[in-house]
Image (cartoon, grey):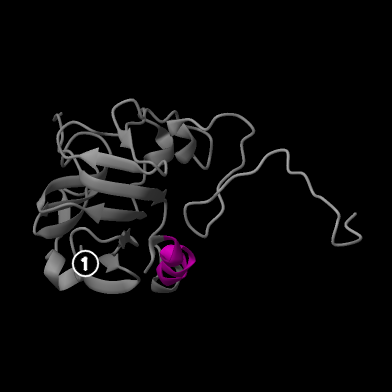
Amino acid sequence: AVTGLNDVIYYRYYQVEAKGHATPFTATTRSSTASLIDLKRTTDIDVSNVSFDSTGQPTFDNTNDRITMPNSSVFNHTSELSIEAWVKFDGNSEDFIFEKGNVNTQYSLFSHGSDIVFRTWHAGDSGYQTLNPSKTTAGITNGQWHHIVGSWDGSTKRIYVDGVDIGSFGGTSSGYYFGGDIAIVKIYDKGLSATEIKQNFNAYKNRFDI
């Protein structure tokens, strides 16, 4: 117990945060994989082909960096779904944030040149459905962090950027590589509501200085 000005407190282990948010404590040396967590602990995450910056943040070179996971029924969403991510684009190119399966066969969230694209292919569909507003319309600035969500509730597809609804409508490849940083990616088996997306944005925005 501390009883006076001359008392001394010793810390056996401590961790310094790069920003004002907590990360899981480890008493051992932190490896590059410590920044990636499968929240359901059901999937192995392969980070051997991605780089990390000095804060443990995954960063992608737009050439061959990628994070991969094995096929799992956990991600088989055919009626509704949401893809949520915090990303920072380094330019305009074919930057895939997340894609399940081969290109244009299931669902994905990505940048295609100057557009941001949310694409799905659900049970009963004859082909994929795409919502693709321009980055300018969506308010996305390259080199800055943005919270991007593609939400599909079974009848309407929507894209949200930084908590704001941007637009909506009803209704085997080597892939493309991302250029920039991706901090968080979450896949939901439901179409997130505007309220839920706004809550998620507010919960993380201070971490990214927004």
Residue at the image point whose x is 61% and y is 36% from the top:
26
How many numbered marks does the figure carry? 1
Q: Amino acid at mark 1?
A: Gly
The answer to whether residue 107 is visible is no
Residue at the image point whose x is 48% and y is 30% from the top:
31
What range is drawn magenta here? 197-207
**Quadrant in the rendering for residue 12:** top right
In the foreground, 58 or 135: 58
Q: Position of residue 105 (x, y in %)?
A: 19, 39
In the foreground, 117 or 126: 117
- Asked if residue 199 is among those painted magenta in the image, a careful observer would answer yes
The answer to whether residue 87 is visible is yes
Number of other residues with Cα within 10 Å of mark 1, as a class: few under 14, some 14 to 19, many 20 or more? few
Q: Main secondary structure of the magenta part?
A: helix
- View extreme (front): residue: 6
Q: Is residue 188 left or right of residue 94?
A: right
Residue at the image point whose x is 20% and y is 43% from the top:
178
Q: Is residue 162 left or right of residue 61?
A: right
Q: Position of residue 37 (x, y in %)?
A: 49, 39
Q: Position of residue 122 (x, y in %)?
A: 26, 48
According to the picture, the residue beneath numbered tag 1 turns out to be 170
In the foreground, 57 or 44: 57
**Quadrant in the rendering for residue 152:** bottom left
Q: Quadrant of the N terminus?
A: bottom right
Residue at the image point whose x is 40% and y is 63% from the top:
192
Q: Quadrant of the C terminus?
A: bottom left
- Asked if residue 64 is among those painted magenta in the image, a careful observer would answer no
Q: Position of residue 84 (x, y in %)?
A: 36, 55
Q: Secondary structure at mark 1?
A: strand
